Image (cartoon, rainbow, N blue to C red):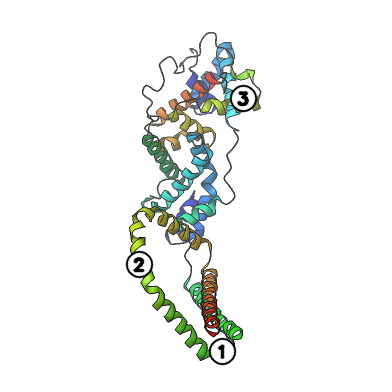
Amino acid sequence: MKCLSIEQIYLFIEKELPLSENKKIEEHLATCRKCKNALEERRHLLQASENLPLWQTPPDFTQQVMARIFPIRVPLSAWFTAAYAGFGSIILAIFILFLVTGQNFSSLLTSLNYSLWNFVRNLSPVFVKLFKVASLFVKTLQQFFEYIIKAFASLTTIINPQVQIIIITIAIILIAFSIYGIKRKILIGEKT
Amino acid sequence: MNEDKELIERTIKGEREAFEMIIQKYQQPLLNYIGRTVGERELALDFTQEVFIKTYSSLHSYKPQYKFSTWLFKIASNFIIDYWRKKKIDAFSLDQQEQDSDLPSLQVPDKEPSIVKKFEISELRERIEQALEKIPAPLREVFVWRHINEFSYEEMAEIKGLPVGTIKNRVFQARELIRTRLEEKA
């Protein structure tokens, strides 16, 4: 048998050759130093190649992929809970306002309504003007608004609906207090 | 392998946990293949995710007579070919990749120097990793499949849609190119 090709050597090491060919190669290797050395060289290479270090995936890899395939959807029941939380917070806010101002419920609502109406009536012409001015800037501010929307969108994915409702309610309370405070200041001014 | 087919059937029926199990089973083999092919860890992690997403969306076209792992790696291989094409790197054509002088000789030369046996196994592994980055992508791909993913020649042929002989030849060329480049510094 003539000397082995390198491919034959690899296939022999990997036991990928037919038995009859294997036997002939074994006989040849017993007599050919050159092929035997070449075989040892490749065997060593394959041994090292078989145990190369493995790259590890991060522990949350599966969750990351699953989140991309199945984006989280808030169940309907969660929205109901959020609505209850929101409603409860508004009742609580009214109750706190009642305690702070000492007015009864209907007069509180009337004064709130009156304050709001005055607020809208007095400021609406200003808003119209502001809107006209703002519309001139819309084109230049478009990019900015896009960023804000993106940021808000990502915030809503982080904060759950209940917390969102609570934040909105707190904002409403703060606005109500501000209105009441402005009104009171005006009244005190009138008295003096 | 029937386990894979069962998991796919369950996934198609809407059982998310079944696909989660597929991801858990194949994430490391895929990352090792993609990672060694593209060379960057973060990019490889991104690509591995993309391959799973693509696999999920194509599950309806999976034919159960084929092995799932070969189908999955076929998707991954095509994904990487697209990536190279977008980067306008003709890395998946073997033509003109290597000059004739670089291609390994088919016969054992009369006075062949011993390269591999000079190194201890641990150092040799490091050098193989470095040399792997320097060989053409199609050869790197089959080397990784053979030695890291432990695919048979038949499986590799099925993934690439090439004759078994061609795959054997590519693996042999990859090994010999790596061997000749072991002495080069990183």
Asked if labels 2 and 3 touch by Cβ distance under 8 angstroms, the answer is no
Q: Give residue A141's position: percent from left, percent from top.
A: 39, 55
Q: Give residue A88's position: percent from left, percent from top.
A: 55, 80
The answer to whether residue B181 of the structure is visible from this angle is yes
Nearest to the eye among marks 3 and 2: give it: 2
What residue is at 55 percent from the left and 43 percent from the top? B28
Nearest to the eye among marks 1 and 2: give it: 2
Distance between mark 3 and mark 2 Cα atoms: 77 Å
Q: Secondary structure at mark 1?
A: loop
Q: Amino acid at mark 1?
A: Gln
- Which chain's residue wears label 1? A
Which residue has dot 3 on it? B124
Q: Give residue B83's position: percent from left, percent from top.
A: 40, 38
What residue is at 35 percent from the left and 69 percent from the top? A128
Q: Choose between A154 and B148: the one closer to the eye.
A: A154
Q: Amino acid at mark 3?
A: Leu
What residue is at 61 percent from the left and 83 percent from the top? A100
In the image, is residue B108 above or below residue A127? above
The answer to whether residue A81 of the structure is visible from this angle is no
- Which chain's residue wears label 2? A
Report crowding for label 3: few under 14, some 14 to 19, many 20 or more residues within 10 A (C-alpha).
Answer: many
Q: Are marks 3 and 2 on the same chain?
A: no
In terms of sequence position, does the residue under pointer 1 or pointer 2 come before the other?
1
Which residue has dot 2 on it? A129
Which residue has dot 1 on it? A103
